[in-house]
Image (cartoon, rainbow, N blue to C red):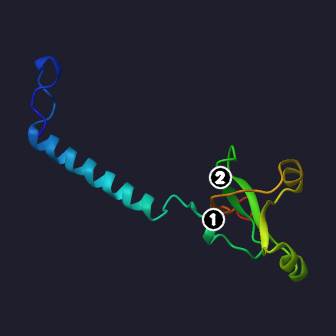
Amino acid sequence: MIDEKGANDAPCWYGSEQADAWAAGFEAARLAYESAKQKGADGWRDIASAPKDGEIFLGTGPEEAWPVAMLWQSYDADDAAEIGSDGYWTYAEQLIADVTGEAKPTHWRPLPEPPSALAGGEG
């Protein structure tokens, strides 16, 4: 419980009941935030769950300064058999892929919807 007096023994604008209610509300908000974070509510998902059908998504990892458009590039059957892998993560923008090489994302999220003005709507 917070004392009814603040710093330097000055009276506080709230009483102990208000302080207890504030503290309980703060704790409830903190628990809700932690729960949402554990469920991935911020939109970021582990890369293991990313689409491998050519869909472009935002990817990020320790080597990225910010999220970048990425996708899974599948090998054809002959190359996959020779290489021993089905494919690899790459950047959607070919220039970035050419300069930086293979992408190494650890997390992904779907691309956001475009602004309504670009999608044919108003605003």
Quarter of the image holding residue 65? Answer: top right
Decide if residue 28 is on the left or right side of residue 83: left
Q: Earlier in the sequence, mark 1 or mark 2?
A: 1
The residue that disc 1 covers is 47
Residue 5 screen position, x and y as percent:
10, 26
Kindly identify the amino acid type of the residue bearing the numbered disc 2: Gly
Quarter of the image holding residue 28? Answer: bottom left
In the rendered image of this protein, does residue 4 appear above or below residue 53?
above
Residue 91 screen position, x and y as percent:
80, 58
Decide if residue 69 is on the left or right side of residue 42: right
Residue 93 screen position, x and y as percent:
84, 56
Rate crowding at label 1 as few (under 14), some (14 to 19) or many (20 or more) other CA atoms within 10 Å. Answer: some
In the rendered image of this protein, does residue 12 appear above or below residue 81?
above
CB atoms of marks 1 and 2 within 8 Å: yes
Nearest the viewer among 87 and 19 is 87
Kindly identify the amino acid type of the residue bearing the numbered disc 1: Ile
Task: Answer yes or no: is residue 118 visible.
Answer: no
Task: Answer yes or no: is residue 41 visible.
Answer: yes
Residue in the image at 49% along x and 63% along y: 40
- SS state under label 2: loop
Nearest the viewer among 103 and 70 is 103
Mark number displayed over residue 68:
none
- SS state under label 1: helix
Nearest the viewer among 34 and 47 is 47
Residue in the image at 81% along x and 60% along y: 92
Quarter of the image holding residue 7? Answer: top left
User: Dividing the image into 4 quarters, which one contains the N terminus?
Assistant: top left
Q: CA distance from mark 1 to mark 2?
A: 9 Å
Residue in the image at 48% along x and 62% along y: 41
The residue that disc 2 covers is 61
How many marks the image carries: the answer is: 2
Residue 77 screen position, x and y as percent:
86, 82
